[in-house]
Amino acid sequence: MKRARDLVDAGQHAGIIDAISALKGEASDPKRDMAYFALLETASETRGEADLSALSQASRDGAMALLDATIKRITSKLH
């Protein structure tokens, strides 16, 4: 998830789905699938900038907000 965030932040990929798909050589299919599901779960729970539209739009700000919210949500469950 953090690597996908780095790709979006650097402007190498405009959207979340492109960024996660680009990790094919770094992450297995099941890991990328888990990332997609984590993003969907965050988007369904979040209102505002981090919502489902961030997945489909090429908005860097929306993508970053959703990625940050998902990373925060996952991290908080680990601690």
Image (cartoon, grey):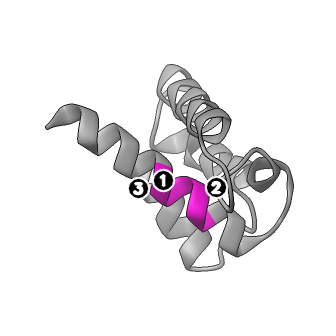
Q: Give SS at disc 2.
A: loop
The label shown at residue 28 is: none
User: Which residue type carries mark 3?
Assistant: Lys
**Residue 12 position (above or below residue 1):** below
**Other-residue count near label 2 (Cα within 10 Å), few / some / many at <14 / 14–19 / ≥20:** many
Q: Is residue 23 magenta?
A: no
Q: Nearer the viewer, mark 1 or mark 3?
A: 1
Image quadrant assignment for residue 65 = bottom right
Residue drawn at point x = 51 percent, y = 62 percent: 5
- Residue at 76%, 49% (x, y): give it: 55
Task: Tell me which numbered mark, 1 or 3, is placed earlier along the sequence.
Answer: 3
Three-letter amino acid code at disc 1? Ala
Classify 10 Å Cα crowding around label 1: few (below 14), some (14-19), many (20 and above).
some
Image mark for residue 69: 1
Residue in the foreground of this view, choosing between 9 and 39: 39
> In this picture, is 32 found above or below 3?
above
Q: Nearer the viewer, residue 67 or 15?
A: 67
Amino acid type of the residue tagged 2 in the rendering? Ala
Q: Are marks 1 and 2 in contact (CB under 8 Å)?
A: yes
Q: Mark 2 or mark 3: which is in front?
A: 2
Q: Position of residue 14 (x, y in %)?
A: 75, 68
Which label was assigned to residue 2? 3
Name the element at disc 3: helix
Q: Which residues are magenta?
A: 64-69
Looking at the image, is 70 positioned above or below residue 27? below
Q: Which mark is residue 50?
A: 2
Question: What is the C-alpha distance between the residues marked 1 and 3?
Answer: 11 Å
Which comes sooner in the sequence, label 1 or label 2? 2
Q: Where residue 9 appears, x then y in whole percent? A: 55, 75
Name, please, the residue furthest toward the bottom.
10
